[in-house]
Amino acid sequence: MELALQIKDLTVHYGGFTALDCIHLNLEQHTTLGLVGESGSGKSTLARVIAGLIAPHEGKILLGTQELKKKRSREQRKIIQMIFQNPDASLNPKHSIRQILSEPLLFHKIVGRTGVEQRCKELLNQVHLEQKALDKFPHEFSGGQRQRIAIARALSVEPNILIADEPTSALDVSVQLSVLELFNTLKAELNLTMLFISHDLGVINAISDTVAVMRQGKLVEQSPKDQFFIRPKHEYSYELLSAVPKMPKSSTSGGFL
Amino acid sequence: MTSGLKRIWNTPSLLVGMIMFAALILLTVFIPYISPYDPSEQNLSAFLQPPSAEHWLGTDQLGRDLFTRLIYAARTDLKIMVLAEIIPFCIGVFLGMLAGYYGKWIDTVITLLSDTLIAFPFYLIVIIVAFASGAGERGIYITFILVGWIVFARVVRGLSASFRNQEWVASAQTLGLPGVRIILRHLLPNVLPQAVVVLMTDMIGLLVAIVTLGYLGIGITPPTPDWGTMISDGQPFITTAWWLSAVPGFAVVYTGIALSLLGDGLADIWRKK
Amino acid sequence: MMSIQPILEIDALSLAAKSNERLVNNVSFSLGKGESLGLVGESGSGKSLTLRAILGLLPNGVEQIGGTIKSDVSSAMVFQDPRGALDPLCTVVNQLVEVVYYRQRVSRKASRMIALELLERLGLPDSLKKKDRYPSQLSGGQCQRVVIALALACKPGILLCDEPTTALDVTVQRQIIETITNLQHELSFAMVFVTHNLAIAANLCSRLCVMKQGQIVEHGATLDILQNPSDPYTQMLIDSVLPLPELEGSRDSWN
C-alpha cells in the first residue's frame, strides 16, 4: 500500500513537559487510522502538528514523498484539513455559513466567483444540510449541524487527508451516530485518508481500519482494527479495552451486538 | 419592524442613550436656525441676565447668550472628542490584534510600550505637549495619539489572545489563510463590538479631559466657545449668577450619561446576540 | 426490587424557567432504601435538573411549579466536574474536615480522624495526610474521590450522582464506579445516578428512568427496559451504543 503520510521521530516539548516522544506513524492511502488514548496522552498535539498548527522540535513529516517544512506552501496546507472537537467554537460566530464556506473556495481558487454559490450548495448537500442554511449564522444551528458545517468547510478545499480530533465527543449519542455515518460515507465517496482521534473505543471501532494507541506522549501500539479489538498487543491497550463499560450480556436485542 | 430595530427597542438603555445623544447632535447642527444670536457677539447693555424668554439660559458677563454659547461649545468639544478618538482607536485595535494573535516578541514589544506610556500620568503628558506645541486642539490630538490607543490595545489584545486558542482560528489556519487575513477578516469582526463599547466609555474620559484643559486655560483658547472655558469664566460670578458655571457643567454630565447609556446598551445587545 | 417503604418519593414534579418554558414535566418516581436508580437521557432531557431539585439546589431562574418531593433522609451530591466542585485554595484534607465538623457535629480533633478515615476508605494515597495537597495537585480521578468523600461525610441516605465519570478517562471511570459500588455495599445508601451512558447505568442500577425533553418516557427494571424497550426513544438510545468485539481472554470485569 502506498503511504499518504509518514511521521518520523516526531518530538514536541512544552517547557519541560514532553508532549510527543519520538512518534513513528504511517498513514496508508485511503484508509482510516483511529488514534486512541486518554487525556494528556498527546493525541491532539499530534493532530495539530500534522495540521501544521504546532511546529515540532524534532522529527519530520512526509506528505507522500515531499517533506513538510515549518513553512508550508498553500498547496500543502490545502491537502491536509482538520475538524475540531468543540462545535461551539469551530465556526467564526460573526460569519454567515455562506462566508464560512465560500472563503476557502475563493482563497484556494477551487471555483471562480460565479461558481461559488453552486459549490456551497453542493457542499451543504454533501453533509445533508438544507441550502437555506447558507444565510444563517453558526449560533442558529445545533451542535451536530455545526459539526456538519465544519466538515463541509474542511472538504471545500478538496483535501486528501482529513484529521478529525474528537469530532463527536461533544455530541449526544444519537447525533454522534449520524455524524459517524456521514464520515463513513464521505471517506468512501471521496477516497479520503483519515486520522480519526477519539477517546471512545466504540467510535474508533465504528470508523477505523487501523488503530494506534498513545500513552504519555508515546505510541504504544499500532495494529489492524480486527486484531486490536480482539487480541491487543500491548498491555495498556488491553487495560483500555477491558475498562469500557459494556451492556449486560443477557440483553440480546438492539444494535449493540 | 426588522429584528435589528426590535432589539434596539427592547434595550431601554440604548434607546435612551441614542435619544439623548441624537438630541444633542441635532441641537449643534441646527443652532444657527434656532438661536438669533451669535455666540461671540457681545452686548454689554444686557450682561449677567437671568434666564428669560428672550435669553433661555440668561447672558454672561459680556452679555452673550448663554444657550447659544453652550451649544456652539458642544460643537467644538464633541468634534474634538470624536476626532481625537478615531486615530487612537484604529491604532489600538490593530496593535491589540497583532499582540494577541501573534504573541511572542510582538506582544512583548507592544505590551512594554503601553506599560511604559501608561506609567506617565495622562495630564502630565497633556500639559507638556500643550506647552510644547502651544495650547489648543493640536495638543489634545497629539497627546491622544500618543496614549489614547493603549486602552483599546489592552482590551483587544486580551480578546484576541483568547480567540487565538479557539478552534475557528485554528481552522482558518489549517485552511492556509495568511495571518493578516485572519486578523482582518476573522478577528476584527469579533473584537470590534467590545472595542466600540470601550470607545464609548473612553470618550467620556476624553470629554472630561478636554473640558478640564479648557478650564485650566491650556485647552481650547478663547474666543472659541468651549464648556471648560465657560465654567472658568463663570466662576467669579458663582454667588450672583451660578448658572453660568453650572449649565456647562451639567452639559458635560448630560453627554457623559448619554455616552455611557449608549455603551451599556450596545454591550447588552451584543451579549444577547 | 421495590422495597415497601420508599425513602424518596417524587410526585408529578414540574420545573420551569422564568420565561415559563417547561424544563421538567410531571416527573414521578420513588426510591427504596439501598436501591439504585438510573436517570438516562441526552442533553436537555432534564435529568440533571431533576437531581438538583431533589437536593434543593435549583439553578437561578428555574422554579418548581408543581409536584412534591418527599424524603425522610438526607442526600448529598457528586458533581460532573470534580475540580470545579473543590475549593482550589483550601487543602483537600481541610475541606473534608470542615464538612465533617459541621455536618456530623463532632470535635475538631474527631472530625480530622473521621476525614482521614474517609480518605483511606476511598483509596486515596497516604501522602494526602502528611502533606498539604491542593486540588490542582491531584489528578481528575483523585479529585472525584475527594468529592465522593465530601458527599459521604454528610452521611447521606441518598447519594446523588450527576455524570460523575463523564469528565474522566475510561480506566479511571471504571475505578471510580467500582469504588462507588463497593461503598454502596458497605454503607448501603440509596443512589440516583444520572448519566447519558446507557452501559454504565445498566451496570450500576437495578431500575432505569429514560428521560426525554423533561419527561420520563420509560420506567422499569433495567433488564426489562434493555430487552423490551417499549418507547422508540429508548430503542434509539440502545441502538446508539456503539458495539465492541469480544475481547479475547477478558475477565469480564463489568459484572
Image (cartoon, coloured by chain):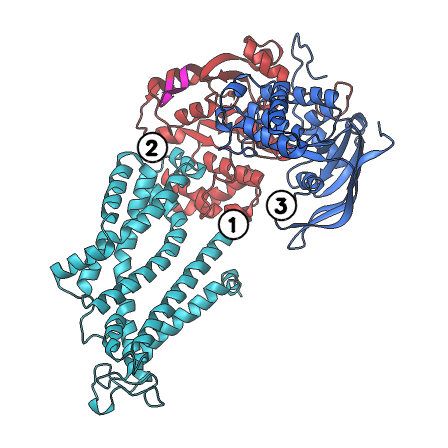
Q: Are marks 1 and 3 on the same chain?
A: no
Q: Is residue C193 visible?
A: no
- Residue B91: x and y, percent? 27, 50
Q: Is residue C4 visible?
A: yes
Residue position for label 3: C59
Give the Cα distance between marks 1 and 3.
31 Å
Give the Cα distance between marks 3 and 2.
49 Å
Residue position for label 1: A136
Residue position for label 2: A74
Tell which chain the image draws in red. Answer: A
Q: Which residues are magenta?
A: A11-23
Residue type, mark 3 in image: Pro
Give the camera-side residue of A110 and B103.
Answer: B103
Residue type, mark 2 in image: Arg
The answer for which chain carries disc 3 is: C
Judged from the image, the secondary structure of the residue bearing numbered disc 1 is loop
Location of residue C32 with respect to C173 vertically, above or below:
below
Q: Colour of chain C?
A: blue
- Residue C53: x and y, percent? 70, 42
| Nearer the camera: disc 1 or disc 3 | 3
Tell which chain the image draws in cyan. Answer: B
Can residue B31 be found in the magenta stretch? no
Give the Cα distance between marks 1 and 2.
29 Å
